Amino acid sequence: MKYAICNETFLDWPFDRACAAAREYGYTGIEIAPFTLAADARQISAEQRRTVRRQAAAADLEVVGLHWLLAKTTGYHLTTPDAGVRKATAEYLRELARLCRELGGSVLVFGSPQQRNILPGVTPEQAVDHAVEVFTTALPTLEECDVVLALEPLGPAEGNFLNTAESAAQLIERIGSPNCRLHLDTKAMSTEASPIPEIIARYADLLEHFHTNDPNKQGPGFGDLDFVPILAALEEVGYDGWLSVEVFDYTPGPEVLAQKSIDYLQDCARRLAL
């Protein structure tokens, strides 16, 4: 298993300090939320991009990719009926693909529930059509940059669009590109009717990236979710990508969240090997 952590876990720490700490705790990958670098990805200069990449490399970390793609932005929305906003959103995704490539990453995790929620007056079918349009428009740049857009199902507490792995898989199949695949998140999957290992097995062929967290919004091992069968399912389907720790409740503090999460995941992996 390869272990990564999302950089916003370290709150307002300088990026180089966050990288050094992540590597010290045992992570080998770092996943970046663009808003931690600038409110708009276009404001991240070429020099800043080179600096971020150098700082990750200096800590012996691989940049996995980007997530929280549209968080803290304005003027972008995936499923809006406004064609101008959809066009702007596709163009911004293209810029994020270029940013991801220049930082050394290869995956864009599309969660951003507030910027994809179905708006009043829009039917679910129309929302899917709008999403297909946006993602398809961005595809040429994703292909050029060799970056995969990984669609992230989120539970109903987060939003009202792509609440299940099945709905995300259907959208991915409509787009029909190897540069658009599936991202799974343990907190989100815990809201589904099927057990998490079954979801992993069912959609293994589409699986590109994986977030580990507990339904209590903290890291793996901070709640009741047992990761042994989850890791067993990933191993069974031959998943060899990243296990990336993403938390939403920072109450325990960055050091505790980072250290305990990877310790727990590594312990689960050892138990599987016995």
Image (tube, rainbow, N blue to C red):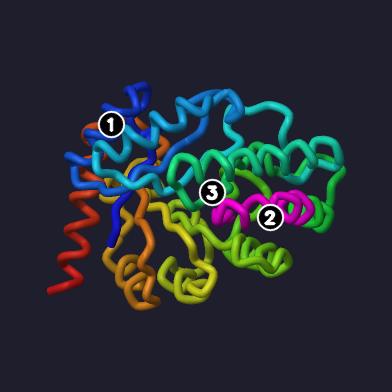
Residue type beneath disc 3? Leu
Asked if labels 3 and 1 touch by Cβ distance under 8 angstroms, the answer is no
| Main SS of residues in magenta | helix
Label ID, residue 132? none
Confirm whether residue 257 shows in the render: no
Residue at the disc numbered 1: 254
Mark 1 residue crowding within 10 angstroms, few (<14) / some (14–19) / many (20+)? some
Depth order, front residue of 104/192: 104
> What is the secondary structure assignment of the residue under circle 3?
strand
From the viewer's perspective, is the residue at label 3 or at label 2 nearer?
2
- In the rendered structure, which disc, 1 or 2, sits on the residue that comes first in sequence? 2
Mark 3 residue crowding within 10 angstroms, few (<14) / some (14–19) / many (20+)? many
Q: Is 129 included in the stretch rendered in magenta?
A: no
- The residues colored magenta run 132-154
Depicted 213 relative to depicted 268: above or below: above
Residue 32, percent from left and from top: 44, 38
> What is the secondary structure assignment of the residue under circle 2?
helix
Asked if labels 2 and 3 touch by Cβ distance under 8 angstroms, the answer is no
Residue type beneath disc 2? Leu
Residue at the disc numbered 3: 108
As measured in the structure, the alpha-carbon distance from the residue carrying label 1 to the one carrying label 3 is 23 Å
- Horizontal side of 145 relative to 131 (left or right) equals left
> What is the secondary structure assignment of the residue under circle 1?
helix
Residue at point 16%, 72% (across, down)? 273
From the viewer's perspective, is the residue at label 1 or at label 3 nearer?
3
Displayed quadrant of residue 39: top right
Residue at point 48%, 62% (across, down)? 208
Q: Which image quarter holds the N terminus?
A: bottom left
Residue at the disc numbered 2: 139
